[in-house]
Image (cartoon, rainbow, N blue to C red):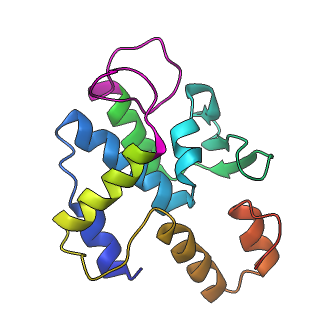
Amino acid sequence: LSNKHLDAFLSSFNRSTSTGSRDYAMCLCLSELGLRTSEVAGLRFDDINWREGTVQVPVTKTRRSRLLPLPKKLGQAIAHYIRNGRPESEDRHIFLRHVAPKGSPASCRIIQNAVSRACSRASLRGCRLSPHTFRHTIASRMNERGATFKEIADILARSRPR
């Protein structure tokens, strides 16, 4: 994904709405950290250490968690969503449904739909963009900067580089 496409994609969200705020923060989790949709959906309040500026990514596909830095832009987006857009709920998941059953955890499908809608709004129809595309983009950029395949695999929680 080129910088131009990524900028257009991220600019397509209406962050003044609760759903737009949520979708933007979820998509930043994909584009800034390279998280899988299941990892984004699984994020809970206890996974973010605001003082240390870190995110403990929940155990998913690889059966191991990992600690990642919390980029400022992502931290601000999550905080904005929590303060201004998140429905009231006792659920500890960060990202919640905004329609029935309102207040329950967002699903992977909700994240996939947020990506698809943003692609359409950003006129990226010719660009094959899925939530997984962001992982490939991050891996490519890390490789271009000289990261080893082991380092890339560790960040993206792959058990072994392909």
x%, y% of residue 122? 20, 69
Position of residue 31 measured from the top left corner of the image (x, y, whole percent): 46, 62
Q: Which quadrant would residue 46 be assigned to in this image?
A: top right
Q: Which residues are magenta?
A: 83-108
Q: Residue at x 65, y 84 (%)?
A: 143
In which quadrant is the N terminus drawn? bottom left
Residue 78 seen in the current view:
yes
Is 70 within the magenta?
A: no
Judged left or right of residue 61, residue 16 is left
Residue depicted at 77% across the width and 80% down the height: 149
User: Residue drawn at (46%, 28%), measured in percent from left and top?
Assistant: 105
Q: Is residue 6 above or below residue 76?
A: below
Q: Is residue 73 in sight in this rendering?
A: no
Q: Is residue 28 above or below residue 143?
A: above
145, above or below 96, in the image:
below
Q: Is residue 6 left or right of residue 93?
A: left
Q: Is residue 117 left or right of residue 52?
A: left
- Figure disc tally: 0
- Expressed as whole percent of the image width and height from the top left, the position of residue 53 reads 60, 42
Looking at the rendered image, the quarter that the C terminus falls into is bottom right
Closer to the camera in the image, 62 or 22? 62
SS assignment for the magenta stretch, majority: loop
Residue found at the far top of this picture:
90
Q: Is residue 101 above or below residue 34?
A: above
Q: Residue 145 appears in which quarter of the rendering?
A: bottom right
Residue found 57% across the figure and 46% down from its top? 38
**Residue 15 point in image, percent of width and height:** 22, 45
